[in-house]
């Protein structure tokens, strides 16, 4: 990674009414080391959509998101492989 920072979108509190920017905050953390069978991606785009609101309240197959945790995401993201155990990736 060029900047050495893992930027994260955290859920500050679960909304009870209209969802707004006050429900989220940006945070920085160390970049995790990939474990066996994992790759490290530099994400350029991520989609937060209607499913995320249901996840905040545990109204789906996932457990409810808790305050001050990284927001979950679905399959919509774009990035590039930065580190991988496979030689063809990257």
Image (tube, rainbow, N blue to C red):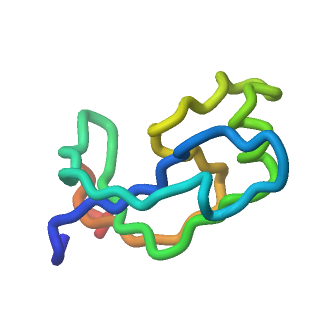
Q: Residue 65, located in which quarter of the rendered image? A: top right
Above or below 80: residue 52: above
Q: Is residue 20 above or below residue 72?
A: below
Query: What's the residue at 55%, 55% (across, down)?
Result: 24
Residue 1 location, x and y as percent? Answer: 19, 70
How far from the left and from the top, in percent, is residue 35?
A: 24, 36
Relative to 40, is 59 on the left or the right? right
- Residue 52 at what x, y percent from top left? 72, 47
The total of numbered circles placed on residues is: 0
16 relative position to 12: left or right: right
User: Where is residue 82, by image quadrant?
Assistant: bottom left
Q: Nearer the viewer, residue 19 or 70?
A: 19
Instruction: Give residue 5's position: percent from left, percent from top.
Output: 22, 64
Quarter containing the C terminus: bottom left
Please tell me which residue is depicted at 18% across the width and 45% down the height of the picture: 33
Front one among 13 and 87: 13
Vertical comparison of 41 with 11: above or below: below
- The answer to which of 66 and 83 lies nearer the viewer is 66
Q: Residue at x 53, y 71 (%)?
A: 78
> Which residue is at the front of the view, 51 or 90?
51
Q: What residue lies at 16% left-to-right and 77% top-to-bottom?
A: 2
The quarter holding residue 13 reads top right
């Amino acid at each position: 990674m060029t900047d050495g920072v893992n930027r994260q979108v955290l859920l500050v509190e679960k909304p009870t009414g209209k969802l707004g920017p006050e429900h989220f905050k940006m945070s920085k953390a160390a970049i995790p080391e990939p474990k066996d069978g994992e790759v490290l991606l530099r994400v350029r785009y991520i989609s937060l959509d209607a499913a995320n609101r249901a996840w905040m309240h545990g109204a789906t197959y996932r457990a409810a998101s808790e305050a001050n945790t990284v927001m979950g995401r679905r399959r919509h993201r774009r990035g590039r492989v930065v580190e991988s155990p496979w030689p063809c990736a990257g």
